[in-house]
Amino acid sequence: MNAAPEGWDRVALVLRLFAADPAGFGGIWIRARHGPVRQGVIAVLRALDLRLGDIHPHVSDEALFGGRDLTAMLATGRLVETGGIATRADVLALSMAERATPGFAARLTGLIDAGLHGVVALDEGASCEELPPHGLTERLAFFLDLDGLSHRESGEVGTWAPDPPAELTPEQITDLAAAASGLGIASLRPVLMAARAARHLAGQAGRERVATEDLTCAAALVLAHRARTAPAPEAPPPETEESHSPVPQNTASPPEELLIDAAQAALPADLLAQLQAGQRQRAAQTTTGSGARQAHNRRGRPLAAQNGRLTSGARLDVIATLRAAAPWQGLRPRPKGMALALRPSDFRIRRFEHRSDRLLIFAVDASGSAAMARLAEAKGAVEILLGQAYARRDHVALIGFRRCEASLLLPPTRSLIQTRKRLTALPGGGGTPLAAGLVAARAEAQAARRRGMSPALILLTDGRANVALDGSGNRANAMGDASRVARQMADDRVSAMVIDTGARPSATLPGLADALAATYLPLPHADARRMSGAIARALEGAV
């Protein structure tokens, strides 16, 4: 079985395959920080027979797809269209792909689905949580991780003659589909991409039909990085007399196990864990690492201008307004002494977008039911997360609840030292006033909203509520009060997650998480570091 080559040989093979059919393969996802290795790969792409265009996640639609030539329209009074980058290039090189928004990715996938362009997504993410949008990477056939490669190893890539691809049998397509299913790949798109790669590999080898080595190599190149599960090894069948008899081998179509093995052999040891950890990030493209996006008319990142009225506080986008008015100048009567005839429908208003500050509200159960060992682990997890929040410049508030009340141990702050001191001094013991903790957290979230912040609640508890809001020790009333406050917080649209820190998963916390519209994470056997890692990943997907 010949799997895909490694190192620079793998890079060269992927680049040759992509150059043979850029639109058919969709593109390449290249994960690498800026450096000589990445620059070398880009230089090779430019040297290939490809029309390459450079774009970034904030390129305007006019620059990408084309628009109107304002100067020519004002001079002629007619509509004059200009071409964009997409009209001048067959392959689009997207830098900082991990920062692409789902909306921008959707525009790129439209070009890919139309069979007009290929995309080279240059992913500069520093961690497994920083990934390009899933809708884009799903359409890119190949993945290259340049980490660990040396630019001294680079060599000639060369090009392939336009030989016709080899034929693929229905049985071989079935094997590829079964291998993809065994790797946890639900989409059929990677199967079609792998089939296309196998046909090109066989055609360039001078074969009329796809062979075993072509399928295994294609599976390693296209399916490996998409794996979501690792199939459990099957127990070997008991030996019988018949098992020793020679069995003729079918070399035309390998079984799905060979393709799965080829794909798994191409995986780095921790890639599955990294990709699974990064799945939640796809649902949080608008909030990763900061607060919610908010429209503004004065400050922030510029957005496309839109039709509007010149009300108080609105800012006119002069260029966009002129572009909208120019095509109609030949039809409009021009006022005396005026160079242009403008109508209210021509007005385009400038828009901006900025991110609000995020407030992470840690509500920690310090009751006696939370055993001291578990409380210590919860404190350790919070302390690790505090360091991560400090790096993202998030604000942090700390609430502790025990006995009959909840108290705000630390109001919103960015001081890591003060938060650690208050957390360390948090005592344990007494009842579990869970509802009181939620009331305090809700009040803090509402105050944060009034200050223009985006609140998020992280509740760490074992779920054994036994103190109601009126101070009585009734478990049923205590859980009922907690559920009622949780539903109120859900109505307030406060992002939240519930961390079960009990020795065993609680039977009541999943229901509380549902009422809170929160993510539920049972972590009965996790230490502080594993707990903080799970919380951090869930936070990126929930906030």
Image (cartoon, rainbow, N blue to C red):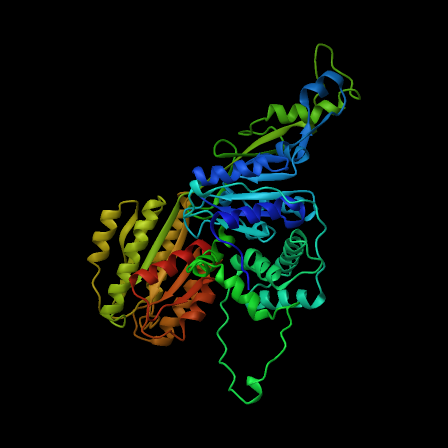
Residue under the point 41% across and 57% down = 537
Q: Which is nearer the eye, 528 or 461?
A: 528
Q: From where the camera sits, is residue 493 visible? A: no
Up-down relation of residue 73 to residue 23 (above or below): above
199 to the left or right of 369: right
Tell me residue 307's x, y (percent).
Answer: 65, 33
Spot occupied by residue 301 in the image (x, y as percentages of width and height): 50, 35
Q: Residue shown at 25%/67% (left/top)? A: 403
- Eyeballing the image, is 370 above or below 452? below
Q: Residue at 57% of width from left, 45% of height from top? A: 15
Residue 503 x, y percent position in the rendering: 31, 74
Q: Nearer the viewer, residue 271 or 363?
A: 271
From what the image shows, is residue 244 above or below residue 84?
below
Residue found at the far bottom of this picture = 241
In this picture, is 464 found above or below 26? Answer: below
Q: Is residue 269 visible?
A: yes
- Splitting the image into 4 quarters, where does residue 463 fall? bottom left
Q: Residue furthest right?
A: 331
Task: State which quarter of the image contains the N terminus.
Answer: bottom right
Which residue occupies the extreme front position in the image?
246
Residue 510: percent from left, percent from top? 43, 70
Towards the viewer: 76 or 146: 146
Give the residue drawn at x 23%, y 47%: 417
